Image (cartoon, grey):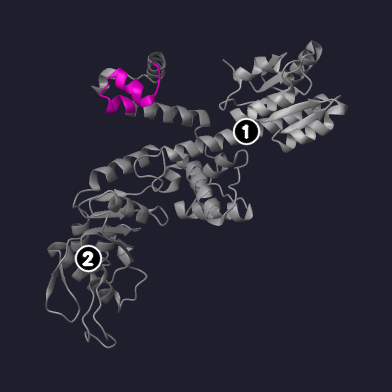
């Protein structure tokens, strides 16, 4: 069944038929109604269309219809048709939420233009609403690891499996892919979550201070050591240490780190007493550590000690369908932070976002979203050079929704072991609707038993 673009309400048959022809010639699908009461039951928050209604109608008039629809969905565009004597009422109605009004007599071009603008606004409203729903429905990692692509689902599964183990983990990913967020997610889902998470950027600490920063020192251990200092590792006891840019760690500090990893014990600089540690190490690098070890730039034995479990973080260009969802999330976060209203994304904006190269990955996308909130300055978009400058063709919104719906049904079937009654309860669906969706997506309950 074709979705309706325009719900046209007028008690004059000739006017209804004439405007139906005008709108259909412009490419819109139209449903005609003589009374507002007939149209109202068909108008809900999922309607992807606009309402065009005369103000003067028998029974419920156009203004009463507007008030009723404001209760159903304040974002549904309502365009009012007005006679000369109704203009003041129409202006008042716009102040109360009407999208626009058209004064009789009006040209076909005026009607088509207003309807087209109303439909563009409606589609943006529904797209942003769907993106917000997806954000709220993310998996247990909450808003940190956002994405519905297979790569992100696989990463979340790995984190769920590894979070509450004692294994040290190596994260590999380009700049801005979210390595620290993954490390925090691992920590927060582990039994160590109540203890300290200590993040250290190995490239930001001067070489002559890094051992003191990491392992601590005793008073008088070196010139300027006027008091005892507890190092980062000791401070993180029973918690997690995150070593970012570990490829930047000086070789002498790598020797001491290897010993700490092997023995879970350290000595402060200037001390002969060992301190037992209960820590988990999560290291991160933006370069190939094995290749760095082969070049003599990283200790090979430390690489193999860290390389027990490795998680690779995908760059944005490998999970483009997640970009609009991430951008919308960053819009909402920035709007809340700066006390501003989150702007709606313009038409085709999502497609353009996905068509572009983001060398700074998630960090660059977040900064672009913040500028968009603060300055209403849309990011300067450059086509991905790896695609030869050709626009990337993303999934459509209906395709996103179908993929998301299928995933939810599959998850409910899996959690209920294929038991239809339990699946119905989890999804809040009648039996027939559930069977229809299972048939649509080719799902067999026997696969989940």
Q: Which residue is mark 2?
A: 299
- What percent of the width, then of the height, locates residue 372? 59, 52
**Disc sitting over residue 244 in the figure:** none
Depth check, front residue: 291 or 441: 441
Gap between marks 2 and 1, in whole Å? 62 Å
Observer able to see residue 135: yes
Q: Nearer the viewer, residue 339 or 394?
A: 339
Point 56% across, 39% down: residue: 351
Q: Residue at x 57, y 50 (%)?
A: 382
- The quadrant of the rendering that contains the N terminus is top right
Q: Which residues are magenta?
A: 412-430
* Quadrant in which the C terminus appears: top left
SS label for mark 1: loop
**What is the x, y in percent for residue 22?**
77, 19
Tell which circle, 2 or 1, labels the residue nearer the N-terminal end: 1
109 vs 241, left or right, is: right
Describe the element under mark 2 as helix, strand or loop. loop
Q: Residues within 10 Å of mark 1 (few under 14, many from 20)?
A: some
Does 231 appear above or below 176? below
Q: Nearer the viewer, residue 76 or 446?
A: 76
- Vertical order, 3 against 331 (above or below): above
Q: Tell me if residue 357 can be seen.
A: no
Q: Which residue is mark 1?
A: 74
Queried whether the magenta region covers residue 44, the answer comes back as no
Q: Disc count in the image? A: 2
Residue 424 falls within the magenta-colored stretch: yes
């Amino acid at each position: 069944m074709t979705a309706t673009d325009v719900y046209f309400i007028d008690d004059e048959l000739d006017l209804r038929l004439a405007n139906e022809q005008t709108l259909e010639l412009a490419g819109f699908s139209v449903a005609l109604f003589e009374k507002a009461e007939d149209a109202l039951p068909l108008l809900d928050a999922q309607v992807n269309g606009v309402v065009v209604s005369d103000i003067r109608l028998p029974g419920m008039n156009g203004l009463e219809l507007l008030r009723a629809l404001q209760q159903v969905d304040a974002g549904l565009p309502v365009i009012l048709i007005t006679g000369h004597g109704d203009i003041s009422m129409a202006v008042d109605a716009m102040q109360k939420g009407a999208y626009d009004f058209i004064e009789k007599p009006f040209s076909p071009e005026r009607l088509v233009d207003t309807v087209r603008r109303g439909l563009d606004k409606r589609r943006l409203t529904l797209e942003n609403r769907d993106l917000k729903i997806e954000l709220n429905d993310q998996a247990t990692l909450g808003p940190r690891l956002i994405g519905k692509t297979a790569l992100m689902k696989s990463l979340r599964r790995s984190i769920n499996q590894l979070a509450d183990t004692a294994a040290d983990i190596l994260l590999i990913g380009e700049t801005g892919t979210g390595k620290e967020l993954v490390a925090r997610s691992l920590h927060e889902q582990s039994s160590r979550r109540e203890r300290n998470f200590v993040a250290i950027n190995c490239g930001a600490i001067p070489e002559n201070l890094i051992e003191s920063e990491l392992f601590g020192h005793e008073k008088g251990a070196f010139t300027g050591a006027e008091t005892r200092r507890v190092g980062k590792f000791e401070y993180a006891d029973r918690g997690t240490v995150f070593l970012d840019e570990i490829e930047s760690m000086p070789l002498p500090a790598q020797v001491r780190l290897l010993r700490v990893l092997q023995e879970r014990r350290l000595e402060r600089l200037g001390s002969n007493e060992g301190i037992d540690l209960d820590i988990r190490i999560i290291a991160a690098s933006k370069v190939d550590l094995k290749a760095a070890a082969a070049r003599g730039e990283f200790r090979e034995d430390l690489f193999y000690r860290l390389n027990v479990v490795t998680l690779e973080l995908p760059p944005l260009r490998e999970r483009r369908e997640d970009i609009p969802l991430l951008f919308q999330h960053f819009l909402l976060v920035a709007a809340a932070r700066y006390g501003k209203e989150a702007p709606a994304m313009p038409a085709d904006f999502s497609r353009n976002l996905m068509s572009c190269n983001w060398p700074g990955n998630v960090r660059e996308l977040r900064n672009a979203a913040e500028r968009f909130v603060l300055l209403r300055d849309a990011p300067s978009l450059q086509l991905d050079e790896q695609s030869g400058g050709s626009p990337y063709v993303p999934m459509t919104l209906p395709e996103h929704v179908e993929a998301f719906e299928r995933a939810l049904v599959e998850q409910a079937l899996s959690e209920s072991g294929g038991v239809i009654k339990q699946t119905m309860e989890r999804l809040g669906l009648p039996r027939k609707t559930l069977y229809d969706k299972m048939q649509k997506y080719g799902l067999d309950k026997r696969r989940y038993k």
